Image (tube, rainbow, N blue to C red):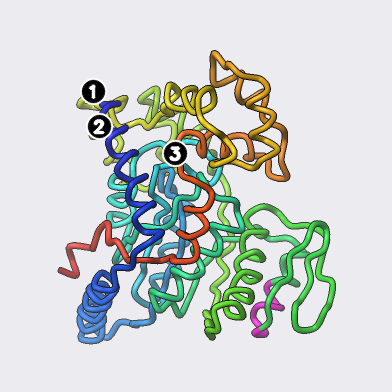
């Protein structure tokens, strides 16, 4: 199974390189046709037809995701943007399972359509946020539902966004772009993502000469969910211990593989030999920042991934080291990633559509 995972990984790599140079406008037109079909069906049933979109990794899809999805669906057609290429998360590590299983989770949970998002694991947070905002715009997104953690500083951020303003994000200084008001010094991570989205919308509008003004629907995050416990329950087959954290649809999908003895086959892992080969034999400044490349090249040869991880200096993000490992794994040149971002989205790749709509 690892060989098929590696084939998919290398296919994704080739696709990213291709998408840095080309555009597929036909895919965008085909997506719009599907949306028109969904709108017609919902209009006939007296349901709202706003374009509602959110990006979530669904790693795996739990009750918090399901709750936010349900809230979003109240406003119209729900599109899940699923970060997928290379199957590396925003933390730089492999997803639990691939995009096809995660998109099945989204459809079974109630999403109308799932489209492929950017390769988060090989980008900085600002880079993939820029890609996501451009994807929202291309999809025609009118409403973005986002889960948030209730805190006094976040209330100021929400009020600012609800007033049609944007957030400016700097270390220990989160303020309103239009009024200059200092809102707070820091936010919980989920809340920071919302502030970063607002900030990036402002920048993309300015840099791309567009007028993207989506409405945010803020959904207070529910408690009682532990990603660590969910993973432990999945690996041990103790699904009864995590059934209160996952929708029945997600449980059924995972149990199907576990009962067949195929769970290990679908769990994604790093290609450690490939990372070691890159770190020991390639000119690293092509793939990672120069100062990190210099440090790693001076410490060659490496005998394990842990040795590489220890040699990588700490960055601003706590996930910096894992993202560097993913860059070594992917071997996509820095210039190609820059062109990919400029050209994004070069196409809309549909991963799944709800059968009820077809």
**Residue under numbered circle 2:** 4
Q: Position of residue 75 (x, y in %)?
A: 41, 77
Q: Position of residue 163 (x, y in %)?
A: 67, 85
**Residue under numbered circle 1:** 261
| 311 displayed left or right of 22 | right
Q: Position of residue 286 (x, y in %)?
A: 54, 42
Tag 1 near tag 3, CB within 8 Å: no
* Residue occupying the far top of the picture: 303
Which of labels 2 and 1 is toward the front?
Answer: 2
Q: Tell me the SS state at disc 2.
A: helix
User: What residue is at 71 percent from the left and 40 percent from the top?
Assistant: 315
Measured Cα–Cα span from mark 2 to mark 1: 18 Å
Q: Main secondary structure of the magenta part?
A: helix
Mark 3 vs mark 2: which is more N-terminal? Answer: 2
| Observer-nearest of 42 and 211 | 211
Range drawn in magenta: 158-164
User: Which class describes the residues within 10 Å of circle 1: few (<14), some (14-19), or many (20+)?
Assistant: few
Measured Cα–Cα span from mark 1 to mark 3: 30 Å
Q: Tell me the SS state at disc 3.
A: helix
Q: Is residue 75 above or below residue 356?
A: below
Mark 1 vs mark 3: which is more N-terminal? Answer: 1
| Observer-nearest of 64 and 355 | 355
Which of labels 1 and 3 is toward the front?
Answer: 3
Q: Tell me the SS state at disc 1.
A: loop
Which of labels 3 and 2 is toward the front?
Answer: 3
Mark 2 vs mark 1: which is more N-terminal? Answer: 2
Disc number at residue 330?
3
Q: Is residue 156 above or below residue 221?
A: below
Is residue 272 magenta-colored? no
């Amino acid at each position: 199974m690892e060989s098929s995972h590696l084939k998919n990984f290398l296919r994704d790599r080739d696709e990213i390189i291709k998408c840095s140079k080309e555009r597929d406008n036909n895919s965008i037109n085909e997506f719009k046709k599907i949306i028109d079909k969904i709108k017609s069906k919902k209009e006939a049933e007296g349901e709202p037809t706003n374009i509602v979109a959110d990006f979530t990794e669904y790693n795996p899809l739990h009750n918090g995701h399901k709750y936010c999805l349900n809230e979003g669906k109240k406003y119209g057609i729900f599109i899940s943007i699923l970060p997928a290429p290379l199957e590396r998360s925003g933390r730089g590590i492999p997803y639990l399972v691939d995009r096809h299983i995660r998109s099945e989770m989204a459809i079974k949970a109630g999403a109308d359509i799932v489209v492929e998002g950017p390769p988060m694991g090989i980008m900085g947070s600002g880079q993939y946020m820029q890609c996501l905002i451009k994807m929202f715009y291309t999809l025609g997104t009118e409403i973005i539902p986002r889960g948030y953690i209730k805190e006094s500083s976040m209330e100021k951020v929400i009020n600012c966004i609800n007033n049609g303003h944007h957030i400016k994000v700097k270390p220990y200084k989160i303020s309103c772009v239009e009024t200059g008001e200092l809102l707070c010094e820091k936010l919980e991570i989920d809340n920071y993502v919302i502030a970063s989205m607002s900030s990036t919308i402002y920048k993309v509008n300015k840099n791309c000469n567009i007028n993207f003004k989506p409405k945010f629907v803020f959904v207070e995050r529910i408690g009682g969910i532990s990603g660590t416990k969910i993973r432990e329950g999945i690996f041990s087959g103790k699904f009864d211990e995590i059934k209160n954290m996952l929708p029945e649809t997600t449980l059924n999908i995972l149990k199907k593989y576990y009962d067949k003895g195929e769970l290990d086959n679908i769990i994604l892992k790093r290609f450690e030999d490939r990372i070691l080969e890159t770190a020991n034999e390639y000119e690293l400044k092509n793939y990672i920042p120069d100062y990190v490349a210099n440090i790693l090249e001076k410490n060659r040869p490496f005998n394990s991934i842990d040795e590489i991880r220890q040699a990588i200096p700490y960055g601003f993000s706590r996930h910096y080291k894992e993202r560097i490992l993913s860059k070594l794994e992917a071997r996509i040149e820095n210039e190609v990633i820059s062109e990919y971002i400029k050209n994004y989205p070069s196409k809309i790749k549909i991963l799944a559509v709800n059968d009820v709509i077809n």
